Image (spheres, helix red, strand yellow):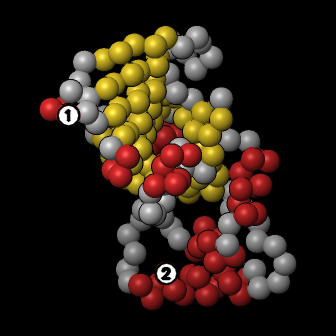
Amino acid sequence: MKDAESSEINDPNAVALATVDEHGLPNVRMVLLKGYDEDGFVFYTNFESQKGEEILGQKKAAMVFHWKSQRRQVRLRGPVEIVSDAEADAYYATRPRGSRIGAWASKQSRPLEGRFALEKSVAEYTAKFAIGEIPRPPHWSGFRIRPVSIEFWHDRPFRLHDRIEFRRDTPDGAWEKVRMYP
């Protein structure tokens, strides 16, 4: 991540997030990773969005970082847990005021009859929260992927890439390192 922060022009923390719906049909979209540590990889969203509902329903997800300028990617997958209210509140408080209003105003992933409806909703919540702090909406929080697999991929000539996978049986298990064929 530190290498990506020095070489990627925009959003080195951008990551493709994959989920599946109740029928097992996959969905993938870009999100911004907002934290990582020994417990996992954290991002935030509206729980009523498509990705929120899919994660809450399946409790599993996968991510892939692709840093083109470095010719590297990192893939991970595992079970998902909801971050604590304290963790979500702390992150929410760091967001720009407009983004906090947007968390209330957007009915994320649902049909929008026109741009004016969104702008009207933003205006209504801006007026509602004109003074003081904007509380975190009850439907907005974070997810933590607790990986059971992390693969580091590095481009090499003639498509003979380096692939190193770390895997474990459970999110609290011991890691096993495996070199994979490209």
Q: Which residue is mark 1?
A: 157
Compared across the picture, whether 126 is left or right of 102 comes to right
- Residue 22 versus residue 162: which sits nearer the camera? 162
Q: Which image quarter is the C terminus in?
A: top left
In the rendered image of this protein, does residue 149 appear above or below residue 12? above
Compared across the picture, whether 137 is left or right of 2 comes to right
Q: Which residue is mark 2?
A: 118
Q: As shown in the figure, which amino acid type bears the numbered disc 1? A: Pro
Q: Residue at x 68, y 41 (%)?
A: 83
In the rendered image of this protein, does residue 7 appear above or below residue 119? above
x then y, percent, for residue 175: 54, 14
Ranked by sequence position, the earlier of labels 2 and 1 is 2
Q: Quadrant of residue 151?
A: top left
In the rendered image of this protein, does residue 95 appear above or below residue 71? below
x then y, percent, for residue 36: 62, 40
Q: As shown in the figure, which amino acid type bears the numbered disc 2? A: Leu
Label 1: element kind: helix
x then y, percent, for residue 157: 20, 34
Q: Residue at x 65, y 35 (%)?
A: 37
